[in-house]
Image: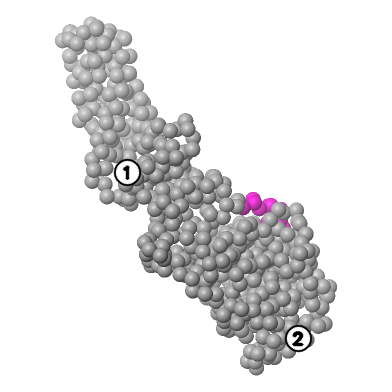
Amino acid sequence: MLLCDVVLLPLALYSAISLRFGTFYPVVSSYYWLFFLLPFLTVPIFIRVGLYRAVIRYMDDKIIATVFYGVTLSVFMLTAAVVMGRVEGLPRSSIVIYWIIAIAYIASSRFMARGVLRSLERRTDRRQKVAIYGAGRSGLQTALALMSSPEFSPVAFFDDNEDLHGTNVAGIRVFNPADALKIMAERDCFQLLIAMPSATRSRRREVIQKFEGKDIQLKTLPGMGELVDGRVRIEDIREVGVEDLLGRDPVPPYSDLLSACIKERVVLVTGAGGSIGSELCRQIAINSPLSLVLFEQSEFALYKMEQELHRHHPFLKVYSVLGDVLNREHLDRVMKKYKVNTVYHAAAYKHVPLVESNIIAGVLNNAFGTWNAVSAAISSHVENFVLISTDKAVRPTNVMGATKRLAELILQAISESGSSKTRVTMVRFGNVLGSSGSVVPLFKEQIRAGGPVTVTHPDVTRYFMTIPEAAQLVLQAGAMGKGGDVFVLDMGEPVKIADLARKMIELSGLEVRDPATGQGDISIEYVGMRPGEKLYEELLIGENVEGTHHPRIMRAVEGMIESVILFPKLEKMKQACTAGDVETVKALLIELVQEYQPMIETGEKVH
């Protein structure tokens, strides 16, 4: 480019003089030396302003400003040379014309070089071709980032804005989304990146549905809140997730509810290394607690959570405690030592088949672990105690759900007795996306392995919610309790697991195998209901439900067992657990949780 400028600068001056005189052959013999002097005056200026530091292949429109600045300084130097050299016969107006022509020559030479380099690149380019849906700022940043990546090559933009159709953004043509499949087929492109980070979830779902089952692999950018300073990195691109298919936008959290039990308080989270527990810790950390106590049985999970909090919140006091909720004395010591104000009890065994085959462990951890935790909270004068419950506690058909309902009954009985000042609250919700034991990671792994994707039953449905949204709603619901409240979260519409599996296969750019013809990439196999599994999950036991001032949180009004009846039975159950008497434990579970209807291995209810 420097050698090119050595030629173009004298040519620009000659062109300016020719235009001024109106001839291709102006007489310049009296000042011919200016043509040799001009590059020596101008090239050092161009070096100083950084014109030769730009990588031509990835150059953007900002280069024009640099060229403008450099040529303007060149004009001043040329004018000084003309004045000091007392040049005769050179029209002064030709210097202004030189200024305009030099900017055009120097700038266009850069863009021509960029075009040639990119054209040569395209001929030998083995990167994966990708189209981008959204030609706004995020789309532009994404395209520029992809151009410099060794993995992807952007070949087309699609945008809903009709004014952009037919235009070029970063040298890439913008097309009507209605022609997307045709355009992508012409360009041998089978990946589409949705660059609409600020769009609503329902709008994202509309876009995704246009390409479902079309052999197009969909990827997306995270929300704007997750991007740093608006800069897009290749690592930010991810496959379209199930959260993009929910079609329900999360309600922004109410800041007063979110921080009510947290700000300037000592907060303890049991099960702090689990899916929900870890997200609760993240949400708590950003709401200015006095300190955060992590209580976790798994050493590795506790270490990971501690390191994450130290990395993102270096000034937050974090205390990591290895412990088991079955050790009441340890819980007591920890809560008293750190003067805990609020407890979020997320520690539980949640995997339905595992708890079904380990009944005593499930009862001890989920029911008696909760009793230990709330008893320690009461004796330590903790202000707020929030239990993380589940929709499987409603008319349970498995041990896991029954133990979680029993935990709710324990808290209701304690609260009803009025013997403590600790405000006890329960929050009940459905499946969270990406949690341990969730079907989503399982399906992803099965798709990656080439299938088959295993579904228990064609009609099985579940409620879904993202982990951050669930954690935020838990924190807000916990702040609204008066004592003994059971809150249920609005989970939106239930999702058919078979439909979910089909969509995940299609969004991976693959086809569901037709069992009749055998055509397609990955098959869906129905393996039968697991022990204790329900076709449909519910959030309410009865019909009595009250609204709250949060649109996604409801208060359930449900039956309970008085403490004078419940606690003696619990003591009897504890003795049976100690003796390893599974039958007595299960019989007492059925007696106490009246809605519990266990299933036999065929999936039928035991009456």
The residue labelled by disc 2 is 569
- Under mark 2, the amino acid is Lys
Report the residue marked by disc 1.
187
User: Which part of the image, by quadrant, shows the N terminus?
Assistant: top left
Q: Residue 300 placed where, x, y %?
A: 50, 73
- In which quadrant will I find the C terminus? bottom right
Q: Secondary structure at mark 2?
A: helix
- The disc, 1 or 2, on the residue closer to the chain's N-terminal end is 1
- 325 sits left or right of 412 in the view: left
Query: Which residue of the protein is positioned furthest toward the front in this rendering?
Result: 516
In this orientation, which residue lies closer to the viewer: 399 or 42? 399
Q: Is residue 251 magenta?
A: yes
Badge 1 amino acid: Arg
Residue 62 higher or lower than 558, as above or below: above
Farthest residue to the bottom: give it: 579
Q: Can residue 356 be seen in the rendering of this structure? A: yes
What is the span of residues highlighted in magenta in the rendered image? Answer: 250-264
| Residue 363 highlighted magenta (yes or no) | no
* x 43%, y 37%: residue: 176
Occupied quadrant, residue 490: bottom right
**Horizontal relation, residue 261 to residue 38: left or right:** right
Residue occupying the point 26% across, 47% down: 125
